[in-house]
Amino acid sequence: MKPVRPSPRPAPAARDREQCLALDRADRLAPLREQFALPPGLIYLDGNSLGALPTATTGRVAQTLRDEWGNGLIGSWNAADWIGMPRRIGDKIARLVGAAPGELLVADSTSVNLYKALSAAIAIVNPAGSTRTLIVSEHDNFPTDLYIAESLARQHGLEPRLVDAAAIESVLDERSAVLMLTEVNYRTGALHDMDALTRAAHEVGALAVWDLSHSAGALPVDLHRAGADFAVGCGYKYLNGGPGAPAFVWVHPRHAERFRQPLSGWMGHAAPFEFAPGYRPAAGIARYLCGTPPIVAMAALECGVDTLLAAEPFGGVAALRRKSLALSELFIELVAARCAGHGLELVTPRDPARRGSQVCLSRADGGYAIVQALIARGVVGDFRVPDILRFGFAPLYVRFADVWDAVEQLRDVLASRAWQRPEFAQRNLVT
Amino acid sequence: MKPVRPSPRPAPAARDREQCLALDRADRLAPLREQFALPPGLIYLDGNSLGALPTATTGRVAQTLRDEWGNGLIGSWNAADWIGMPRRIGDKIARLVGAAPGELLVADSTSVNLYKALSAAIAIVNPAGSTRTLIVSEHDNFPTDLYIAESLARQHGLEPRLVDAAAIESVLDERSAVLMLTEVNYRTGALHDMDALTRAAHEVGALAVWDLSHSAGALPVDLHRAGADFAVGCGYKYLNGGPGAPAFVWVHPRHAERFRQPLSGWMGHAAPFEFAPGYRPAAGIARYLCGTPPIVAMAALECGVDTLLAAEPFGGVAALRRKSLALSELFIELVAARCAGHGLELVTPRDPARRGSQVCLSRADGGYAIVQALIARGVVGDFRVPDILRFGFAPLYVRFADVWDAVEQLRDVLASRAWQRPEFAQRNLVT
């Protein structure tokens, strides 16, 4: 971690609010913001935790409730194609992550999907008597990933091997069974090189399982180019699917037919409505379904995913990535220029190619209270223990002027010591 | 299975539609039907598959979307107590199934919860080297239960032992690890004696895991009186939570702290927002949480559960049970009296004490088409392979006159052979 310093460039991309407004006027993606029902005046820099509400969602969910459930009742499984939703929405998400139609499925939570994917990966590379006993991951990976890996390691007599991000390649060896990583680190915003790390895993005979929770919808992912083996991801961050939205799971076609995943619920059966007593896995990705899909939540998720597909005529995820980096670059530069001397350090990599769509700062003390003080002023980021101030730049709805305003509020909160007011010290249940 | 014959009583409880209407007028529970947005004229006898839409749900979900998600955004985890929903709704469901507050949790799907509960039960009774290697269940149990048991049996070197309902007690012995049953059989409507079977399992040293999918909200369940060890159940049948609603899981307090369940996601951690790399299970039932709870779906589920709690001033589940049996009894009697000679057989036990809230008929041929013909006339039941016509009597909204009308339509479909029209032979994706 290094103090936030001005970039090598002579000046930020914008030196004042007017220039930021000019950047917004020139932004071809700007109209995509109209897809969201954001509260007026709020600067929402937490789309990396919970995406914003699309304007289409309320109507679509009401239709699902009133017309499909209320009037169509049980018949809507056929008539409204509820039964097809996990694959239909999966096909849409596939377009965002370099997967082919029919390869990706919406189901359950990220944690549950990781359990399925990691179980299958272990089954492939860790047959009885194998000496491949390590699940390699980053010490700082999102905890749920580590907890699921810990559970499966215990179950299969394996061992988690958790290292710093920089050490991952060097610890991969012939004892490695699976490399399991989140492409963008939730706490630092650092972006892994999926292609290189997948290759490194394959070179030692391990499989690569990727969690795309902080990348799907925010930056270009190409699962096939990387040759990844399994992937999971979250529906409620950049995909704007709503709180606790269903997650997704992808399996490379070379593995999809090979192994059962242990959560062998009836919806993943080859013929669920035959109600046969013995489990026979469905072909391909469909076996990664488990219980009955949550239709209302899926309807909301589809609206969220559609907000990203709406960017396709404007250059799609690649264009979103360019804007995301322009926003985060501007934020870093403005913080360096305007908040100097307040003890902030940049946690996120300074190199744009190595960061996701968020910028994390740290401060020796007061991080939590500073975030609370900003929230009280309508600038919503979040805090992650022990000392991280986290700001996400969802390119579909964050504006350059928002970046300016957020930094100005941050500067003022620091300069005025407003964050030291006692009400900002009080911890919430969820941070 | 026996032909549907008139009961020993001299005559049905109602001999004509007028008498049914009189029964409805005398029904103290009748006003509870106003809680639902049922399509006018429709007779919905499939609440055992998908409960009806409560009128409160659309507004409540819209509020969750617009106010809580749209305006409150990430802050609603605290401000709208999203984080508390799995336990709050769990406490409400607990009142329906004889569990105490804090013992029951809403999470994931029934299949996923069964995986958690059955894993923990196996861990308790099947330590290394144990000769308790059988998971005993009913051959005709709902397939997802059998598939999950099959998966866990393979994982732990156990063996599913599937028998007919009548043989369950006799096969329980010192090799039995777990007795896993659905209290009401989805295909026959037969009701197990939970108290007696749990006792029988315990007498041989096995644990009892109950699936309450077809009983919660339809008939009195008393998990503590039965001394059950684990229970799971469905949110979208009698609980009216909407298609694919989250499910629930209950663990007897004597087991809750003892074992980890394998789906160790971050929301089941003792301190999820410490983001510690090592898993430390939360106290009690909270460790049965896995990923982030699906808030929109939970809001809908809570409205559904509330429709059952609204029956508490009218006698609660016991009163619902009395009405349910009066409805199913009337249906059986009317079918016997008015559809005789059409080859229908009664699959559901004739003894009311041995049946759930549904009545299943079978017929040598035409079952599927007969159900389709009834649906075309606005009488919605469903068909289950190979030959079951299934009619559910959700006591919150089914009326005695509905039973009369349904039987009259059934009689006419059979007498007129309307079901033989080709359009009724065409199979839907979901039956």
Image: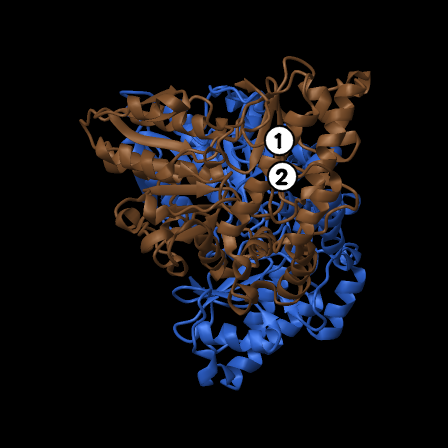
Chain colours: A brown, B blue
Q: Are marks 2 and 1 in contact (CB under 8 Å)?
A: yes
Q: Secondary structure at mark 1?
A: helix
Q: Which residue is pictured at 38% across the width and 21% down the height? A: A162
Chain of the residue on which disc 1 is drawn: A
Q: Amino acid at mark 2?
A: Ala
Q: Which residue is pictured at 55% across the width and 40% down the height? A: A325
| Residue underneath mark 1 | A333
Residue A318 in the image: x percent, y percent? 49, 50
| Left or right side of A263 for B360 | right
Chain of the residue on which disc 2 is drawn: A
Instruction: Give the camera-side residue of A413 and B382.
Output: A413
Residue B70 in the image: x percent, y percent? 72, 46
Instruction: Give the camera-side residue of A223 and B278.
Output: A223
Identify the mark nearer the N-term, 2 or 1: 2
Q: Amino acid at mark 1?
A: Glu
| Left or right side of B196 for B78 | right
Q: Which mark is residue A13?
A: 2
- Tell me which corner region of the image, top left, top right, bottom left or bottom right, holds residue A405: top right
**Image quadrant for the N terminus of chain B?**
bottom left
Residue B179 in the image: x percent, y percent? 41, 35
Q: Secondary structure at mark 2?
A: loop
Mark 1 is surrounded, within 10 Å at the Cα level, by few (under 14), some (14 to 19) or many (20 or more) other residues, namely: many
Query: Are dots 2 and 1 on a single chain?
Result: yes
